[in-house]
Image (tube, grey):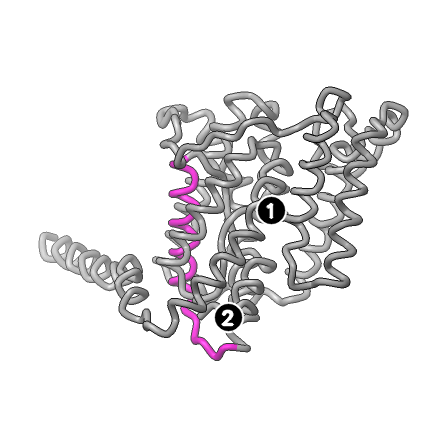
């Protein structure tokens, strides 16, 4: 019996030694840095930073979370996944699909805007991270190969439709809570349509018009950022916040603080696994699909298990430091690649 136990412990020790290589990825990343890569990577990083600023705020609002939570997640997700992931070009942070999944899951736990809602978002990110890291260590990355691109496209398209209708209440400045079901959202929009704030609607349509025109005639310009700055300037110059236009207000200027998570709240912990599993699976499939699409152009060889670990660590760190669940972003990853990032 003692020999059997010794054999099991030896096998476990050997497995732990073999799997530890996944956590040493940053050393390899640093060794592969070349002097000639610094300048193009710096320019690509600045370009992605310009794109991620309005996106992170918008995606956090989709999940009914404060804007700084989106910024924290964007910073931490990009750094951790960049160091521990497999792809050289995949940018990790808040995404529209993951934000929608997070919202749909958290609505069953706490009302948006409450302290419990924010705590639940952090818990979910940590649980998602643990699931993804374990899947990577158990060499389950091969499962991603069996997910067709049409499934990913279908999910993304469906999420886009839901997000568009769910954000209509912000465009029209209507006062009703978010619904994960499309039918309930449409019903609320119709019932509250007569409460539309026309000034807010005009401001939103103007920002969208700027973005569309820039994307058509100056595609290299940061259209989303310009549209956001223009709308903010008009709001400030004409004091539109005093005429009913809602503004974000001051955003904390500190670095991401350590989240105050009650680690022994088992009721909250056990309420998260179903939603967390969906976020972990969809986020992982989306990230690997994006990485593969870019790798076909660059010729890079990817390690799906390493990417599992990188995405998992990014989610866990984001949750611990006042962020929420993250995944790979197609838009920012392509911007990184097309801007010359190496």
- Between 227 and 271, which is closer to the camera in this rendering? 227
Residue 151 position by quadrant: bottom right
Q: Which residue sits at x=42%, y=46%?
A: 76
Residue 317 position by quadrant: top left
Say if residue 327 shows up in the picture. yes
- Magenta span: predominant SS is helix
Residue 175 position by quadrant: top right
Going by the image, does 205 lie left or right of 42? right
Q: Is residue 13 above or below residue 64?
A: below
Q: Which residue, given by chain and number where applicable, does mark 2 sit on? A: 340
How far apart, in angstroms, are the residues tagged by discs 1 and 2?
21 Å
> How many residues crowd around disc 1 within 10 Å: few (fewer than 14), some, or many (20 or more)?
many
Counting from the top left corner in percent of width and height, residue 65 is at 57, 32
Say if residue 145 shows up in the picture. no
**Mark 1 against mark 2, which lies toward the viewer?**
2
Counting from the top left corner in percent of width and height, residue 67 is at 56, 34
Q: Which residue, given by chain and number where applicable, does mark 1 sit on? A: 55
Q: Which residues are magenta?
A: 298-321
Asked if residue 312 lies in the magenta stretch, the reply is yes
């Amino acid at each position: 019996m003692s020999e059997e136990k010794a054999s099991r412990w030896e096998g476990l020790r050997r497995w732990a030694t073999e799997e530890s290589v996944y956590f040493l990825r940053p050393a390899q990343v640093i060794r592969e840095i070349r002097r000639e890569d610094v300048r193009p990577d710096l320019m690509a990083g600045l370009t992605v930073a310009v794109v991620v600023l309005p996106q992170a705020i918008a995606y956090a609002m989709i999940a009914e979370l404060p804007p700084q939570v989106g910024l924290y997640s964007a910073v931490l997700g990009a750094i951790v996944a960049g160091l521990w992931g497999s792809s050289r070009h995949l940018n990790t942070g808040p995404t529209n699909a993951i934000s929608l999944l997070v919202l749909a899951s958290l609505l069953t736990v706490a009302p948006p805007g409450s302290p419990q809602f924010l705590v639940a978002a952090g818990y979910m990110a940590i649980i998602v991270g643990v699931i993804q890291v374990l899947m990577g260590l158990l060499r389950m990355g091969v499962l991603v190969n069996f997910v067709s691109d049409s499934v990913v496209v279908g999910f993304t398209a469906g999420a886009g439709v839901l997000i568009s209708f769910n954000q209509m209440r912000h465009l029209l400045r209507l006062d009703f809570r978010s619904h994960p079901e499309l039918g309930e959202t449409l019903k609320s929009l119709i019932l509250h349509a007569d409460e539309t704030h026309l000034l807010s609607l005009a401001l939103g349509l103007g920002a969208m018009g700027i973005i569309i025109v820039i994307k058509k005639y100056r595609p290299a310009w940061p259209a989303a950022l310009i549209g956001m700055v223009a709308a903010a300037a008009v709001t400030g110059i004409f004091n539109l916040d005093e005429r009913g236009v809602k503004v974000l207000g001051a955003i904390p200027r500190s670095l991401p603080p350590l989240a105050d998570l009650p680690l022994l709240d088992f009721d909250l912990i056990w309420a998260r696994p179903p939603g967390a599993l969906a976020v972990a699976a969809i986020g992982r499939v989306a990230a690997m699909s994006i990485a593969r699409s870019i790798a076909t152009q660059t010729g890079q060889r990817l390690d799906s298990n390493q990417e599992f670990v990188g995405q998992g660590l990014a989610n866990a760190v984001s949750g611990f430091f006042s962020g929420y669940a993250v995944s790979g972003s197609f838009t920012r990853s392509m911007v990184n690649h097309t801007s010359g990032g190496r």
